[in-house]
Image (spheres, helix red, strand yellow):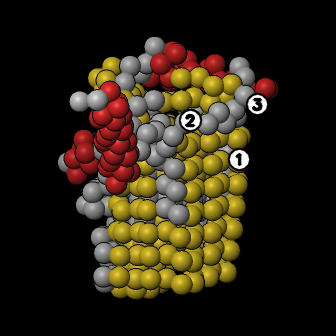
């Protein structure tokens, strides 16, 4: 065999090897893309200062309790408030925690594969006063449990990420509620009160003990690209409940829960009338909603402070008992006006449109609570 022939064979071998390697590489890339496994995108720096939850000793093994780590991280963010605030990155893992309070000028960023997990020990959930426009716990007289993620008088708060999750582990709470073993009204998953300039986007909220997302007397709230999930029989697990808020946008969300997917509210009976904060200028658009036992989009029944200027458009509601519903009770007071529905698609819905002015409520003296 001549030298030229040997060189040609060697070159052909290496060319064949390079071609085979390239084919395998491109097959792997295409396989990952086809199966939803692209490499994680880089995490943007949305604030002048950035912390990682692990900087404060957190462990995302699903067993270690990280409440103190969240609290220490948020204390560090408070110190940067005058300098534009800070971002807290929660990386992949299951981060078990009791409820904690967020602060102003803060971004809570949930990476892909990150889940904040609620602890199931009711003794570690703080007890809060009743909301002033309700006058008592929503389910039981007296006080109420805190939400898992809670904020009061917060300005410029962002909850976002690469579709990381917040899991309320609500099964224990639902069973305690059904057995009437709880002393107080169950806690929400995320609740922000008396706050302004709130953005919640690109995260998943699931299995809340009670309502999932409850902005209360807030101004300028944007909720976008949020997925909210709970079993269809999980009691009172509303998706999004704007309550006595002004300027709310809910868009591009998928909601499948055990009660109303979205319910616009403004307080309850005489307490809501006295508090006198209407829910004004609410837009709900490009939402897919499912509520097997209730409605896709509701107004009320707690609307004693008034509800006005609501636009619901390009909404797809399926597998639900009711499509859209406006509900109140005799003596509840308040008003509902300037409501516009456009381009609704209702599939497998028992009743499309319901306006109910005698929404059932049971007598507290008989040991039951008002219907929700």
Disc 3 designates what residue?
A: 84
**Mark 1 vs mark 3, CA separation in Å:** 16 Å
**Quarter of the image holding residue 99?**
top left
The disc, 3 or 2, on the residue closer to the chain's N-terminal end is 2
The picture places residue 304, in percent across and down from the top left corner, at 59, 67
Q: Residue 244's mark?
A: none
**Dot 2 lies on which element?**
loop
Label 3 crowd bin: few (<14), some (14–19), many (20+), radius 10 Å:
some
**Dot 1 lies on which element?**
strand
Residue at (53, 29) in percent of width and height: 89
Quarter the N terminus occupies: top left
The picture places residue 37, in percent across and down from the top left corner, at 36, 45
Residue at (79, 26) in percent of width and height: 82
Q: Residue furthest front?
A: 2
**Mark 1 vs mark 2, CA separation in Å:** 25 Å
Residue at (35, 32) in percent of width and height: 4
Label 1 crowd bin: few (<14), some (14–19), many (20+), radius 10 Å:
many
- Seen from the viewer's position, the closer of residues 19 and 297 is 19
**Dot 3 lies on which element?**
loop
> Can you tell which of label 3 and label 2 is closer to the viewer?
2
Label 2 crowd bin: few (<14), some (14–19), many (20+), radius 10 Å:
few
Disc 1 designates what residue?
A: 196
Q: Is residue 75 left or right of residue 156?
A: left
Q: Residue 43's mark?
A: 2
Residue at (33, 19) in percent of width and height: 64
Quarter the C terminus occupies: bottom left
């Amino acid at each position: 065999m001549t030298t030229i022939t040997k060189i040609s064979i060697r070159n052909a071998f290496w060319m064949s090897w390079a071609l085979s390697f390239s084919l395998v590489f491109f097959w792997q890339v295409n396989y990952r893309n086809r199966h939803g496994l692209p490499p994680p995108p880089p995490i943007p720096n949305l604030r002048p200062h950035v912390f990682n939850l692990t900087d404060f000793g957190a462990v995302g093994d699903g067993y270690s309790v990280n409440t103190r780590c969240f609290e220490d991280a948020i204390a560090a963010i408070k110190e940067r408030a005058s300098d534009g605030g800070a971002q807290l990155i929660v990386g992949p893992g299951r981060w078990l925690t009791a409820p904690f309070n967020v602060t102003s000028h803060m971004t809570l960023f949930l990476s892909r594969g990150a889940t904040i997990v609620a602890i199931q020990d009711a003794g570690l959930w703080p007890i809060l006063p009743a909301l002033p426009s309700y006058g008592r716990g929503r389910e039981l007289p007296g006080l109420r449990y805190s939400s898992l993620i809670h904020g009061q008088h917060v300005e410029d708060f962002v909850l976002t990420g690469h579709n990381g999750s917040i899991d309320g582990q609500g099964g224990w709470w639902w069973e305690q509620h059904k057995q009437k073993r709880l002393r107080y009204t169950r806690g929400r998953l995320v609740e922000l009160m008396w706050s302004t300039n709130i953005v919640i986007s690109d995260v998943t909220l699931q299995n809340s003990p009670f309502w999932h997302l409850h902005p209360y007397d807030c101004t300028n709230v944007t909720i976008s690209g949020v997925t909210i999930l709970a079993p269809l029989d999980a009691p009172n697990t509303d998706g999004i409940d704007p309550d006595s808020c002004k300027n709310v946008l809910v868009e591009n969300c998928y909601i499948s829960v055990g009660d109303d997917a979205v319910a616009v509210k403004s307080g309850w009976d005489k307490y809501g009338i006295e508090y006198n904060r209407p829910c004004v200028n609410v837009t709900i658009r490009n939402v897919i909603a499912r509520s097997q036992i209730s409605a896709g989009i509701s107004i009320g029944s707690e609307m004693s402070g008034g509800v006005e200027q609501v636009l619901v458009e390009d909404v797809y509601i399926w597998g639900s008992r009711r499509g859209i519903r406006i509900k109140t009770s005799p003596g509840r007071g308040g008003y509902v006006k300037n409501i516009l529905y456009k381009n609704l698609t209702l599939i497998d819905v028992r009743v499309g449109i319901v306006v109910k002015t005698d929404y059932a409520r049971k007598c507290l003296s008989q040991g039951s609570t008002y219907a929700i």
